[in-house]
Image: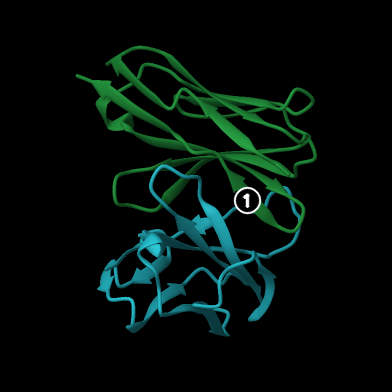
Chain colours: A cyan, B green
Amino acid sequence: ETGVTQTPRHLVMGMTNKKSLKCEQHLGHNAMYWYKQSAKKPLELMFVYSLEERVENNSVPSRFSPECPNSSHLFLHLHTLQPEDSALYLCASSQEAGYSGANVLTFGAGSRLTVL
Amino acid sequence: KQEVTQIPAALSVPEGENLVLNCSFTDSAIYNLQWFRQDPGKGLTSLLLIQSSQREQTSGRLNASLDKSSGRSTLYIAASQPGDSATYLCAVLVGGNKLVFGAGTILRVKS
């Protein structure tokens, strides 16, 4: 366990379903992130939250809706997804969301999403 | 736009061999460079972080170097073991607090 816990680990959903991915960190970090890892493509940053405020939205479609109710929890709400959205969704946290060269991200194990 | 390339895409070596993984990036304006390890179906584990002012970092059998001006980094693994088999990812931290990742090198160490 890295201190960043993601649930569920696996999710299969239809295109009309609504589901949510959850991330929880026990490290006292102030920044949290969602990354998407598709097959044979580099990880892509989706969202960054700093002190519960969204500071980065990397041109992500509105069918992905993040929520950060407090500095320890991050959700990704999913609605009307497409089969091409099938991927591993990784959550990460760091002490801060600033430009420090020592800003180390701690990743969770990921949620494997399959959209039918 | 920053792009990160990792070569080779896959590598298979016998146990005990020393090996080098390569990473290149197109824009030298980075805050740091990190090497991660990813096991199948798992998240990422940070291996080494090199700040932009540093040239190398070492941890056990791992040594990573950074030549920011030429946009290159190498990860050297000494005396490879089957447990080293994994995907190795290189990422650079750029403005906007973004980590830009390469596609990874899949390493298999045969016993």
Given residues B85 and A87, the one toward you in this image is: A87
Quadrant housing the C terminus of chain B: top left
Asked if residue A38 is positioned above or below residue A116 in the image, the reply reads above
Q: Quadrant of residue B91?
A: top right
Left or right for B88, reference A12: right
Q: Residue at x 36, y 21 (%)?
A: B11
Chain to which mark 1 belongs: B
* Residue sitting at the far bottom: A69
Q: Considering depth in this image, is A39 or B67 the residue closer to the camera? A: A39
Depth check, front residue: A63 or B82: A63
Location of residue B102 in the rendering, given as x and y in whole percent from the top left corner? 54, 39
Query: Relative to residue A42, is residue A88 depicted above or below?
Result: below
Number of other residues with Cα within 10 Å of mark 1, as a class: few under 14, some 14 to 19, many 20 or more: many
Q: In percent of the image, x 58 and y 68: which residue is there?
A: A60
Q: Amino acid at mark 1?
A: Leu
From the viewer's perspective, is residue B53 above or below residue A2? above
Q: Nearer the viewer, residue A23 or A94?
A: A23
Using residue B109 as the reference point, say whether residue A95 is left or right of it. Answer: right
> In the rendered image, which residue does mark 1 sit on?
B99
User: Measured along the vertical axis of the image, is residue A37 above or below residue B40?
Assistant: below
Q: Residue at x 77, y 53 (%)?
A: B95
Element carrying mark 1: strand
Task: Tell me residue A1's x, y (percent).
Answer: 35, 60
State which quarter of the image contains the N terminus of chain B.
Answer: top right
Instruction: From the top left corner, tell me how far across and down residue A61 is, in percent.
Output: 56, 71
- Residue B31, image x and y in percent? 75, 45
